[in-house]
Amino acid sequence: MPTQQEFPPSPIHQTETEQNHHKPRTPRINNELRLEILLFLLLRKEKHSDELIHGTNRQAVIKFGYTRKTIRLIWQRALAHKAAMDSYFYDSKYHNCGRKRIQVTYESIASIAMGDRTTIIDLVRMLNLSPTTVWRMVKRKQIKPHSSPLNPGISEECKMARMKWVLGLLMDYSIPNDPTYYSMYDFIHIDEKWFYLTQKSQRVYLANNEPFPHRKGKSRTKIPKFMFMAAVARPRWGQDGQCEWDGKLGIFPFTDAVAAKRTSKNRVKGTIETKPIKSVNQIATRAMLINYLIPATKEKWPPHEGERVIYIIQDNAKAHILQNDQEWQQHYKQDGFTLILTQQPANSPDCNILDLGFFRSIQSLMHKKMPKTVEDLSGAVTEAYNELYAKTLSNVWMSLQYVGNEILKHKGDNDYQLPHNKKKILEDEGNLPEQVKAPRWAVNECKQLVDEWRANQ
């Protein structure tokens, strides 16, 4: 005989509670639907009274799926607003339900010393709140974490130099009515950077039971490194949005190929090894400019007609040569190219494309390749330089113009946050400018300050 469990009970013999046990709950009515119900009722009321036509409530119940009580409350609320000669306010009071959030004022956080709010636990102790409450305030962006960088000090002379530098980037005929930056298509930015073989700490994501990777090195403090010189120009884009030239002139290591003097367990005597240059001085940078940068510029620069004057922007490092260098004077004019060495303002890494963001992008890509030897390091840096999307470089050139605006607004100082101008959104909308405009008031004030400073010298 079959057991009793094989015969499910008939729906006729189920109680009403059992039948409605899995009935979905009616969703909470929102403001838009409440207004839609009111419009439905207004179209079905008597012409010369506030009474609804017979059967209107039933039709609203069938159409919207809510009870008669809900429909009647919406109509009565509208009548009350009409009697008070007030506009209909259809917002609900649902936001007043539940436990109220703990309110923390701006003054209570800002009055805490910087050293007493470096971690969430410090804030918990100073605000007398729970860690969960503080963490939820961080997620709601009521409290925001910030890493404060150490910026170079700016003297008054340096501020004037920064203002003059930015004013020099503006087209003369556009001042003062509509100050606009040059397109900067005849600029080359160069700079040097150390690239390390590996990082002291590398973050990766592992599977559940995957063993931890074990990384070893001879020393944590003396990690092998190479210095590279990078040179970039502004990329060129066609009318159809395609990249015609990526603006990359090359990244060149300061290394020498040296034969091994003796045999070891790693190589035999006479094997050619890559060794970093012991001292990167003016001799090394001059040779890099003459032997690598000039040929790369002549080879990769877009076609042009007639004489082409190109400005090479560099910082004020002691290893850099100036335009009046005797040996440089013999090479700076070649095959229709005139290369002019120009120094950016002192203590101003934000005025160089490479320091502004391009080096950081290259470094992040390079560390993903995880080179094992110093020979692999040079190849990894070159591959990361070549793989970086040209749009990233183009965006940094746009950021340089916006940084110039911040320098003018702050009268040459560097106490500002790097601007984020939603370049991706503007590009998708077709409103991304090729040449950024500077604020007229900032340009006029800075010109007046520079003129007064010159008069007092």
Image: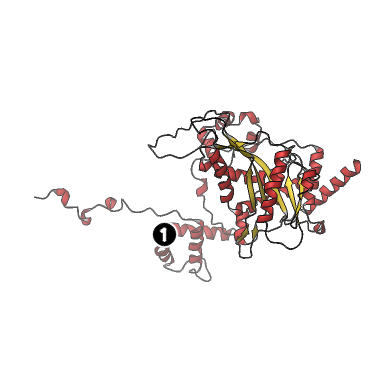
Q: Which residue is mark 1?
A: 68
Q: Is residue 411 visible?
A: no
Q: Residues within 10 Å of mark 1 (few under 14, many from 20)?
A: some
Which residue is drawn at the image coordinates 38% and 53% (left, top)? 25
Q: Residue furthest left?
A: 1
Image position of 260 (left or right of 186): left
Which residue is drawn at the image coordinates 45% and 40% (left, top)? 205
Which residue is drawn at the image coordinates 76% and 37% (left, top)? 154
Residue 78: x and y, percent? 53, 60
Q: Splitting the image into 4 quarters, where does residue 145 fall? A: top right
Query: Which of 311 and 334 lies nearest the eye of the viewer?
Result: 334
Q: Please state which amino acid type lies under the numbered disc 1.
A: Arg
Instruction: Assign a secondary structure to mark 1.
Output: helix
Q: Residue furthest front?
A: 270
Query: Which of 443 and 240 lies nearest the eye of the viewer?
Result: 240
Query: Which of 197 and 171 lies nearest the eye of the viewer?
Result: 197
Query: Which of 244 and 228 lies nearest the eye of the viewer?
Result: 228
* On screen, residue 196 above or below 291: above
Q: Is residue 153 visible?
A: yes
Count of picture labels: 1
Residue 286: x and y, percent? 72, 42
- In the rendered image, the quadrant that contains the C terminus is top right
Which residue is drawn at the image coordinates 65% and 60% (left, top)? 431
Residue 292: x and y, percent? 67, 47
Image position of 99 (left or right of 326): left
Residue 276: x and y, percent? 62, 36
